Structure formats: C-alpha cells, structure tokens
Image (cartoon, helix red, strand yellow):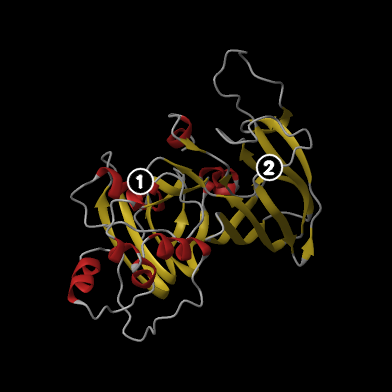
C-alpha cells in the first residue's frame, strides 16, 4: 500500500492509520470492531475504533502497540528523536473505561520491539522506519472493551486532493486471524466528499449509505483497478462483514484523478472544500466563471433554476440535488469564498 505514493515522486505521504496489535502471540481474539474514518476539511482523517476483545484465559497484562510508517516527501522526513509521529495527533487508548498511558519509540518496520538502527544503505533514496506507540493492556477474563482514537494528515499527490491509507492486515495477528464482527464507516461530516475505495479488500461486502445523502457505484480506475466510487454529503458509507480476515489494506482517495486522466468520465470536476487542494489551480482557469462560482452551491445540492446550470451539474455523479436546500453562504469555507471572488 505504501508504494502507491512512495513509488513515484509525485506526492506527499504523511501517515497511515492502523489497528492496535499484540506484540507477542496471545490467546485473545477480536469479537467485534467498529472502525470509523471521518474525512475532514482541515486535511485530517479522524479515526475512532471501538473494539470488543475476548480473553480466553486468565486475567493478564499484554504488551500492545500501534505502528505508523515514517513520512515521505514531507517537511519531516527525518527521524523524530522523541519517537512521536509528526503527523499523528491526539492518540488515545481507553480500556474498560480507563485511559492507558503509552510511550513512543522509533523502530524497524514491522518489528515493534526492535529499535531503529539507521539506514541499511547510505545511498538509499528513502529511509524506512516506523514510529511506535507502546503500552501495557490489563486484560480481564472474558470481554474487554477498548476505545481508540487519533487523527492524522491525509496524504496527497498528482491527481488526488487527498489519500487516506489504513492498514487492515496487522489485525490478523490476534487469535484466529479474524475479526468476528467488523464494521467500517467512512464519514463526511458537515461537508461533501467524493472518493474512491478499494472495497474488494472488504471481501466485497455491500456498501450502504446509512446517514445523510450519498451515492455509490463500481467503476474502473484510471490504471485498471476496479474501485467503488462514493459521493457523500453530510453522510456515512458503511460496510459490515462477519468473520473478517483482512488480507489487504484499505485505500481511500479523492476522485479527482478521473477529472485529470479520464477525459470521458462522468465524474466531473469536484472542487473539494478542503484547503488541501494542491495541484489543480490550472484546472480552475479552464472552468467558466459562471460554473466555478456555482460549485459551492452544487456541492450542497442546490436545484438550479437556470437550465444551463441544471443540465451541467446533473451530468455528474457527485451532484445530488436537494429541493429543500435554501441557498446560504453561512457555512462557506475560506477556500470557497476565494473561488467565488476569483470567478466574479
């Protein structure tokens, strides 16, 4: 998964999300996991995970950890000696109602107990190491509930305003290698987001829109992979799987790649409200002024009275008209105000 960005010098990789894992083999299994990833306009992905673990033996303390790969092409590529990841924030683990202390370390990738020794080859283009968050978890017999939250910077690259990477496969280190009851939720809270998901990693579980307004369809990605295309407005997409065995990792990326590389796509230009829109100012100049200044209203579902505008936006997958929407600028972002000002 990491190679999606690191294999080409065309983007910035900040961090990946991932599960909590045991450092040593245990007889503890994951009975239930609810993973919620919120795509936010401040450039962050916010992660909230609710676990139910089953300890099949006597009460004991288990060494656990969370691993995050180091950034690439960012301002903080070097090793942070404190061991804290420069692009992960508000890390918290609460177990059975008690917040757990943790320590940070810089470790070899995939080896949370092995301190990082430095690059193997001084000519390596990219130095690889991981930031670890390590803690001791007091498991009681039977059911144990864990709440885990953190935020991290969304990555980006040519053709994608944001890219959210989340490691699923390390969860297989728990007993049995499966999650008994797994739910993934991707949210666009108080905003609109248009993105692609490699949902085949979820064993082709059905995606449902469970909150707000949303649409979905399977589509062929520019380089040949089939992805699920999702448009959400103040909404949540959800996948539910029983006996889930994660065999690949999750990628969520903005759908603007279609606009840049697939001239025949019906995805249409989607001006993300985030300030993290890095590469596409030249596309702004190609959009007629009357279209560009109406994009913020189209994102909110405004039903246009002018036939030209109505026909233009109706051709695009992400446009979801809402007859009840009353035009207002109350929630316009600074980015959207600039868009309107530049296209008067």
Where does the image place residue 249, in percent across and percent down from the top left?
46, 44
- The answer to whether the residues at label 2 and label 1 have Cβ atoms under 8 Å apart is no
Question: Which one is in front, 13 or 288?
Answer: 288
Which residue lies at the image location 35% right of the left edge and 61% below the top edge?
Answer: 230
Element type at marker 2?
Answer: loop
Where does the image place residue 60, in percent across and percent down from the top left?
79, 52
Which residue lies at the image location 21% right of the left edge and 77% below the top edge?
Answer: 306
Quarter of the image for residue 50 reads bottom right
Question: Which one is in front, 134 or 283?
Answer: 283
Above or below: residue 132 compared with residue 41: above
Element type at marker 1?
Answer: helix
Which callout, 2 or 1, points at the residue further toward the start of the chain?
2
Q: Which mark is residue 86?
A: 2
Above or below: residue 17 compared with residue 335: above
Question: Which one is in front, 312 or 55?
Answer: 312
Q: Which mark is residue 282?
A: 1
- Whole-angstrom CA distance, mark 2 to mark 1, is 31 Å
In this rendering, the label closer to the viewer, 2 or 1: 1
Name the side, left or right, on which 94 lies relative to 288. Answer: right
Q: Residues within 10 Å of mark 2 (few under 14, many from 20)?
A: some
Q: Which mark is residue 204?
A: none
Above or below: residue 342 compared with residue 159: below
Question: Which one is in front, 144 or 310?
Answer: 310
Q: Residues within 10 Å of mark 1 (few under 14, many from 20)?
A: few
């Amino acid at each position: 998964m990491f190679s999606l960005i690191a294999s080409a010098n065309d983007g910035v990789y900040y961090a990946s999300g991932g599960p909590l894992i045991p450092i040593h083999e245990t007889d503890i299994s994951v009975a239930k996991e609810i993973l919620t990833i919120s795509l936010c306009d401040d450039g962050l992905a916010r992660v909230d995970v609710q676990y139910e673990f089953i300890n099949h033996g006597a009460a004991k303390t288990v060494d656990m950890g969370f691993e995050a790969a180091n950034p690439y092409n960012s301002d903080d590529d070097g090793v942070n000696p404190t061991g804290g990841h420069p692009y992960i924030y508000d890390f918290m683990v609460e177990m059975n109602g008690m917040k757990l202390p943790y320590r940070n370390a810089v470790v070899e990738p995939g080896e949370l107990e092995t301190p990082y020794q430095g690059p193997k080859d001084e000519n390596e283009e990219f130095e690889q190491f991981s930031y670890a968050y390590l803690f001791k978890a007091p498991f009681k017999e039977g059911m144990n509930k864990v709440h885990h939250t953190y935020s991290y910077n969304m990555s980006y690259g040519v053709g994608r305003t944001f890219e959210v990477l989340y490691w699923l496969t390390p969860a297989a280190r728990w007993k049995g290698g499966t999650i008994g009851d797994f739910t993934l939720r991707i949210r666009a809270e108080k905003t609109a987001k248009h993105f692609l998901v490699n949902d085949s990693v979820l064993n082709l579980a059905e995606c449902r829109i469970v909150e707000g307004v949303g649409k979905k369809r399977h589509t062929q990605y520019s380089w040949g992979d089939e992805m699920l295309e999702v448009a959400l407005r103040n909404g949540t997409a959800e996948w539910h799987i029983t006996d889930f065995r994660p065999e690949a990792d999750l990628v969520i990326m903005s759908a603007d790649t279609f606009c840049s590389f697939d001239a025949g796509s019906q995805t249409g230009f989607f001006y993300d409200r985030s300030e993290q829109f890095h590469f596409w100012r030249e596309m702004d100049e190609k959009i007629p002024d009357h279209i560009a200044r109406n994009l913020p209203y189209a994102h909110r579902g405004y039903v246009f009275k002018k036939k030209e505008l109505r026909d233009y936006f109706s051709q695009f997958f992400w446009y979801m008209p809402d007859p009840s929407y009353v035009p207002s600028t109350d929630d316009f972002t600074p980015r959207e105000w600039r868009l309107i000002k530049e296209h008067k």
